[in-house]
Amino acid sequence: MKHPFSIVIALLLVLPTLKAQDSVSRTRFSGGMMLHSGYLTGRIEAIDHSVEGAPFGLGGVIRYHFINHIRLGGEGYVSKLSQPQGGYIRLGWGGLLVDGYWTLKRWTPYLGFTVGGGSLSTLIVRDGDTKDWKSEPDAMLHNSSVMIIDPFIGVEFALTRAMRLTMKADYIITVANRDCPSGVRLYLGIVFAR
């Protein structure tokens, strides 16, 4: 198969237009923004540097509700973990997601995963400080691409028919890139449904 992503995109465009068997009031899509934090640890072996701390970030999600209990869509986030002396580790990533959900009155628990990729940017300052305009005597900047698999679990609470509070937890697994710190991230946000 030469273009698997073009098949997925075609399905995302065509399937929502097919007539559903249930009522017209069924949710067709949902999307919104989420803030996140958590606790990450890791080690950059090439420079013998240990990493740990709380990342902070922002991102968003859009999901198409194709059939009862199955949603397909995409999500993308930027997550930044600050390092001493003005350094950082920043992961910008996105991908295609699939999740299963169950509606229990106002609560909608869900479980799924995202497959995608992104960019990992690392600035480590061992001597000096990035808050001044002087050259740093010992600083390292490294950029690399990452492929990710991101299992997640969460729950939505319906505030109104169209607005939901969402909470989720994930654990990003990077494929063939050991420099990316790992751990659990917790997300909180608002999702709008139609």
Image (tube, rainbow, N blue to C red):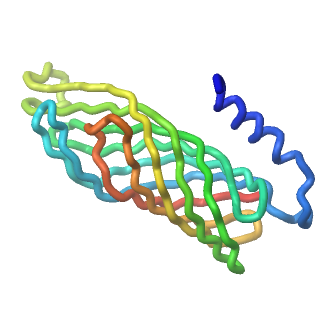
Residue 107 in view: yes
**Count of numbered labels shown in the rendering:** 0
- Tell which residue pokes out farthest to the front in this image: 1
Occupied quadrant, residue 156: bottom right
Position of residue 45 measured from the top left corner of the image (x, y, whole percent): 15, 36
Residue 131 in view: no
Position of residue 80 measured from the top left corner of the image (x, y, whole percent): 34, 43
Position of residue 72 measured from the top left corner of the image (x, y, whole percent): 67, 50
Residue at 65%, 66% in the rendered image: 101
Q: Please state which of residues 73 and 78 is positioned toward the viewer in this rendering.
A: 73
Residue at 23%, 25% in the rendered image: 141
Residue at 45%, 33% in the rendered image: 118
Occupied quadrant, residue 50: top left
Query: The N terminus lies in which quarter of the figure?
Result: top right
Q: Image height check: is 180 above or below 109?
A: above
Residue at 89%, 66% in the rendered image: 22
- From the viewer's perspective, is 42 left or right of 21? left
Position of residue 169 measured from the top left corner of the image (x, y, whole percent): 45, 62
Q: Image height check: is 144 above or below 33?
A: above
Query: The C terminus lies in which quarter of the figure?
Result: bottom right
Q: Please state which of residues 38 and 163 is positioned toward the viewer in this rendering.
A: 38
Q: Please state which of residues 146 and 36 is positioned toward the viewer in this rendering.
A: 146
Q: Image height check: is 145 above or below 99?
A: above
- From the viewer's perspective, is 102 left or right of 48? right
- Tell which residue pokes out farthest to the bottom in this image: 105
- Tell which residue pokes out farthest to the top in this image: 135
